């Protein structure tokens, strides 16, 4: 089955630790996106990528890093520099600009 | 999301019609999307408009006016399961990069 997979679904980390969220897609999509969603709010763009080995900062990139070494994978690292990392993180992929994005099921990160 | 405005919440009765308005940034516009998101879940794609006019898909319709930077999502024959957040999203092309920018979402509450 084709789709986009995020893992894990729930993640707990201690304050000050870096943590990497996985996002994999087998839809052959060129574009991939990471969003953050806080309770009762919309999606805010963290990073996005249109091609392998290249990516752009979104609106709230500070404290996050990404890589795009393979077309299928776009992992997000939440670093200790991110002031308020507890949130729902959503990864999406699509064929590119002007086309819809398909979402993974999300990772709920809690930093204690 | 910046430059995308939609109402925070709307309440309607089962069987009624609700119209959710969205205004967006016109510079770099490359398409307007509507997504539905139930609490705790990932957004799911509802509709896409890139040309002016109305797109109908069952009980849901979406309208676009590019000159006004305006779109709406029309939900007809409301059902209880339509209670969800509805997200307006804009595909933007800036500096040859395409990104998908979301509004804060409109929470629709359907009452019996």
Image: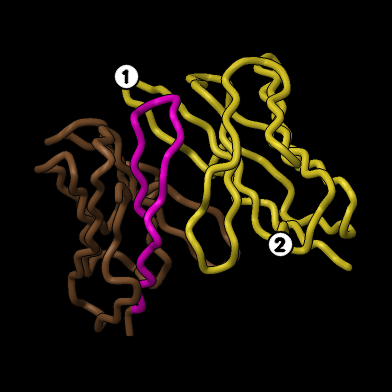
Chain colours: A brown, B yellow
Position of B101 with respect to A106 (left or right) is right
Tags 1 and 2 both on a single chain: yes
Eye-nearest disc, 1 or 2: 2
- The answer to whether residue B83 is above or below residue A70 is below
> What mark, if any, has residue A51 been given in the picture?
none
The residue located at (67%, 15%) in the rendering is B52
Q: Is A101 a magenta residue?
A: yes
Position of B95 with respect to A55 (left or right) is right
Q: Position of residue A23 (x, y in %)?
A: 25, 55
Pointers 1 and 2 in contact (C-beta within 8 Å): no
Residue B14 seen: yes
Q: Which residues are magenta?
A: A91-110
If the image is split into quadrants, where does the N terminus of chain B sit? top right
Residue at label 2? B81
Percent of width and height locating residue A17: 18, 76
Residue B20, picture quadrant: top right
Chain on which label 2 sits: B
Where residue B106 appears, as percent x and y from the top left, is: 69, 52
Tell me where residue A36 appears, x and y as whole percent. 41, 57
The image quadrant where one finds the C terminus of chain B is: bottom right
Q: Secondary structure at mark 1?
A: loop
Dot placed on the residue nearer the N-terminal end, 1 or 2? 2
Q: Residue at x 35, y 52 (%)?
A: A91
In the image shown, does B99 or A30 lie closer to the viewer?
A30
Q: Is residue A90 left or right of residue B112?
A: left
Q: Which mark is residue B96?
A: 1
Q: Is residue B107 rendered magenta in the image?
A: no
């Amino acid at each position: 089955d084709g789709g986009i997979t995020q893992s894990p679904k729930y993640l707990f980390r201690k304050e000050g630790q870096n943590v990497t969220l996985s996002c994999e897609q087998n839809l052959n999509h060129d574009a991939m996106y990471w969003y953050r969603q806080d309770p009762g709010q919309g999606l805010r763009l963290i990073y996005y990528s249109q091609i392998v080995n290249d990516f752009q900062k979104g609106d709230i990139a500070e404290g996050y890093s990404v890589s795009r070494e393979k077309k299928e994978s776009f992992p997000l690292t939440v670093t200790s520099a991110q002031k308020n990392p507890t949130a729902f993180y959503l990864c999406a992929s699509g064929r590119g600009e002007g086309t819809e994005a398909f979402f993974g099921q999300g990772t709920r990160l809690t930093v204690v | 999301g910046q430059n995308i405005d939609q109402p925070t919440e709307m309440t309607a009765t089962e069987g009624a019609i609700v119209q959710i308005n969205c205004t967006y940034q016109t510079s770099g516009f490359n398409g307007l999307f509507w997504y539905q998101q139930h609490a705790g879940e990932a957004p799911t794609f509802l509709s896409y408009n890139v040309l002016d006019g109305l797109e109908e898909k069952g009980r849901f319709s979406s309208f676009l006016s590019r000159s006004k930077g305006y779109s709406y999502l029309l939900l007809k024959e409301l059902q209880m399961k339509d209670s969800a957040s509805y997200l307006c999203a804009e595909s933007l092309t800036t500096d040859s990069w395409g990104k998908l920018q979301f509004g804060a979402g409109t929470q629709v509450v359907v009452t019996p």
